[in-house]
Amino acid sequence: MLSELESIVGISEIDHLVKLSRFLQGKKIVHINSTKIGGGVAELLTNILPLKHELGLDATWEIVVGQSDFYKCTKMFHNLLQGVKNQIVPDTLLKVYEQTNEENAQRLYDLLNEADFVFIHDPQPAALIKFFPNRKGKWIWRCHIDISRPNRQVWKFLKQFVIHYDASIFSLVDFARSLPHPQYIIAPSINPLSDKNKDLNKEDIEKVYTEFNIDPSRPVLLQVSRFDRFKDPIGVISAYKLVKKSIPSIQLILAGGSADDDPEGSIVLEETLTAANSDKDIHVLSLPPDANITINALQRAADIVIQKSTKEGFGLTVTESLWKSKPVIGGNTGGIRLQVIDNYNGFLVNTPEGAALRIKQLLSDDDLFKRLKRKGREFVKDNFLITRHVREYLTLLVILQQ
Ligand code: UDP
């Protein structure tokens, strides 16, 4: 992978990684999250681990597992930390959360107690630290979600665990909190060589038109997302319906799958199907978790990609689409603002009406369309590739071990 990456990012970036890795030889690095399947964190770890291995690092990835009440609780955390109002997490679920973390701590005790560096991703495993009073290594809380305006009850509860970490990492400055340890800002990334992002030949792309009954001669608007309310699939359908009034040929694809740790997916999928109301030009695709080439092909087959999230920690789907030279219409929120520069590589929008206006503009102004689509790939290359991301992680580890 390193030599192929070198042809994209240049030799000095790879040299930098190799040199940093020398400081970390023999150190045990463990990543923990709550699912190997579905969602951005699993996508990131799937790509980062092999690169670390190729750099000679001893990195492993484990997950915490629980029963349905655990995922119910952590999905409530996810929703409430990102701004859902008027809910409180019952004490019974908070107990399940802590107990599940304790059980996982027992299962993973030797590995985590002896590790030199432990990355804990997101709130689901955050309480593990409580059960390692004699831990040897440095523990880092890596928060991927937007906690800029968290629900007070949930943040107060989580903070009692988070304060014990040696450092935290957020994707954006806006997400950092008041904490008694150093906080670092590191944006996520994509792997340009993965099945999700590698170049495809024409036949691979054309296959998705046939497979999903999409007309290649008509404009295609695409959103790829888990079926989650923060991704606003209903808002995407509203925008599509507004565009349809003046551009009747438009087709919409909403491609998603589920994540193992997301119990709300099937409900939101149902809501989306209801809103689609059997419109034959709306293709709601429920894809298996390993449909990477299909997603890659759909992103390449689309004319415009939309990611109309109302909250977004980062939004790898935006990065993936910009990398494929697609203009992206993104919700004006969180990590999308880091990636979509208004009127440069896409447009930021606040409402379905705003999204519809920009879609119509792009589909009717060829010069604008061409100008925006040219910028995305270069922007991702300069800012959001895996080599930059791993370089920043390794730099942080070198600093922490001083
Ligand atoms: N994804 C996927 N299949 C799906 C939906 C999404 O493989 O059906 C991928 C998507 O391509 C991206 C990741 O899951 O790589 C989602 O990451 P993002 O940061 O956009 O959102 P998250 O799900 O973490 O909120």
Image: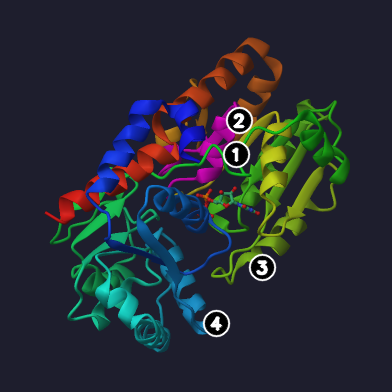
- What residue would you read off at disc 4? 68
Magenta residues, start to end: 313-337
Classed neighbour count for the residue bearing mark 1: other residues with Cα under 10 Å, few (<14), some (14–19), many (≥20): many
Under tag 3, what secondary structure?
A: helix
Identify the disc placed on residue 324: 2
> Are dots 1 and 2 in contact, CB under 8 Å?
yes
Q: Residue 210, how many percent across, how many down?
A: 88, 40
Extreme residue toward the top, this view: 367
Q: Earlier in the sequence, mark 1 or mark 2?
A: 1
> Are dots 1 and 3 in contact, CB under 8 Å?
no
Colour pattern: rainbow
Mark 2 belongs to which amino acid? Lys
Q: Residue 94, how many percent across, how many down?
A: 37, 83
Mark 3 belongs to which amino acid? Ile
Which residue is more in the foreground, 127 or 133? 133
- At x 44%, y 36%, the residue is 385
- What residue would you read off at disc 3? 267
Which residue is more in the foreground, 95 or 401? 401
Q: Earlier in the sequence, mark 4 or mark 3?
A: 4
Q: Earlier in the sequence, mark 2 or mark 3?
A: 3
- What residue would you read off at disc 1? 197
Picture quarter with the C terminus: bottom left
